[in-house]
Amino acid sequence: MTNFFLLLYPGWAKHTQAGLLAGLGLLLGTAGTTQAQTAATFGAVTIVSSGAGSTPYAIVVADVNGDGIPDLLTANQVSSTAGVLLGTGTGSFGAATTFSTGAGSYPRSIAVADVNGDGKPDLLTANPVSNTAGVLLGTGTGSFGAATTFSNGAGSYPVSIAVADVNGDGKPDLLMANQSNSTAGVLLGTGTGSFGAATIFSTGADSYPNGIAVADVNGDGKPDLLTANSSSSTAGVLLGTGTGNFGAVTTFSTGAGSTPVSITVADGNGDGIPDLFTANQGSNTAGVLLGTGTGSFGAATTFSTGAGSYPRSIAVADVNGDGKPDLLTANYGSSTAGVLLGTGTGSFGAATTFSTGADSYPRSIAVADVNGDSKPDLLTANNGSSTAGVLLNTTSIMGAPLPTQPVAATTAPLVTLYPNPANGPDVSLAATGLPTAARYLEATLLNPLGQVVRHLTLPATQGAARGALPTTGLAAGIYVVRLTPRTAQGQVLQASSAQRLSVR
């Protein structure tokens, strides 16, 4: 799975985040209450061809023709194409249209972003055999122009791509996991759809990274790089300077013999700090490394994805509506999608698996609501059957209805968000009933996938705090505002509370 952090800037936010979360509208569990865990269920897989002999390696979801309906995009390894399957909004998809990524390119990863500033989503691919990043500019109708390729360095063999603005100029840049030379490649964007020469940063000797993600993991407001290092069984962390450069890699073990091949970032234990999640094909596990907020991570905890599952991709989303992030894996060995329900503490339950089709051998998984019922569905790139798999969410309980009035959590301060639903550039946040020792109120906004999209710290005095939470550029949907009161020294005074925010 292609992993990328949703850094919001004009043009890209409109299509990338809106597309990826199109119609998700996931109702998270009632803020500040404890709910019984609801089992997540999915219907039988529907198979959609990604093209004869396409052998898709990765899948992402975005609206690429501007109709507000999620579409499927695949990186087709053997046919050296990008596949586009336009959605109907009912969970079905039209016939695949393919666009060349370059002769002999063999793409293994795909991302979607507006890289030339025309407000239309473009396709980006990691092409290992040609050692390039591919750019296919979109027309806004679901079709794409001829691929332009940019060298990632001789012998780099890029296998994963992410998109983010890493030098603060408001233009999307490309980030690559280069397997053969154990590096991360950075190609700075010009804003016109072209990219500069690749700068490479070591991910560790003989680390052979297979996956890359981007997130701010040390809270300095600058995007950092995270890699899944398959050969060294580590997660690599390269802290960003905000100029397009990155510091020396620090590695954290994902477990002896774990062989991580995919990485993503989300808050798995509700402390407002980004955590790392890996798909460990060597140990048949999902790995969880809880963040400290300083760029370091605790020891990996692993959770079985099933004997012989051989997970190749991981995603994080709340699929049962309890407000807690769950883990989703594409299990290549067992031809299944795995679901591990979260407890909200950073631990996860036993894996439940759902068939992706006999001998489908899925290599990538994505999550989005593709039939408009406000439940997140699972999408897989089925390498063995040259198909995309669609598993519609049939979970019967998806959390409580969105409250029409502010709700005071039973053990939390009274929080008011106005207006709610949000319909302007920001939302007024007011909290009362904080501990009298509180000097700061940490406010973290999480999207329906549990990813941090906004973070601010408000001064608190006499048990109250007020401030403005920016909402410009956010895709429509249901978000969670998580609030944590702290002392002047940063000590947490009270368990985090949460309030749901609707964005229109």
Image (tube, helix red, strand yellow):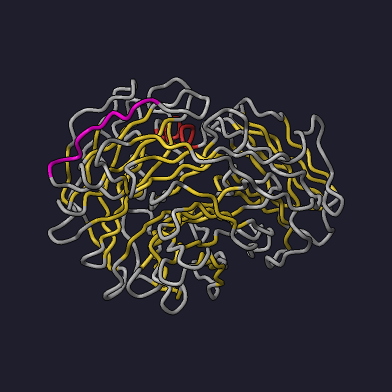
Where residue 272 sits, quadrant-wise, is bottom right
For the point 68% across and 68% down, which residue is it?
489
Q: Nearer the viewer, residue 29 or 497?
A: 29
Q: Is residue 95 a member of the stretch shown in magenta?
A: yes
For the point 18% across and 49% down, which residue is it?
132
For the point 68% across and 63% down, which residue is it?
345
For the point 56% across and 37% down, which residue is it?
392
Where residue 405 sits, quadrant-wise, is top right
Q: Which residues are magenta?
A: 94-103
Residue 263 visible somewhere in the drawing: yes
Above or below residue 146? Residue 216 is: below
Q: Nearer the viewer, residue 63 or 273?
A: 63
Residue at the far bottom in the pictured view? 256
| Quadrant location, the C terminus | top right
Q: Is residue 144 a member of the stretch shown in magenta?
A: no
In this rendering, position of residue 72 left or right of residue 135: right
Q: x and y percent of residue 152 in the render? A: 19, 53
Above or below residue 277? Residue 11 is: above
Residue at the far front in the pictured view? 358
Residue 164 visible somewhere in the drawing: no
In this rendering, position of residue 460 left or right of residue 11: right
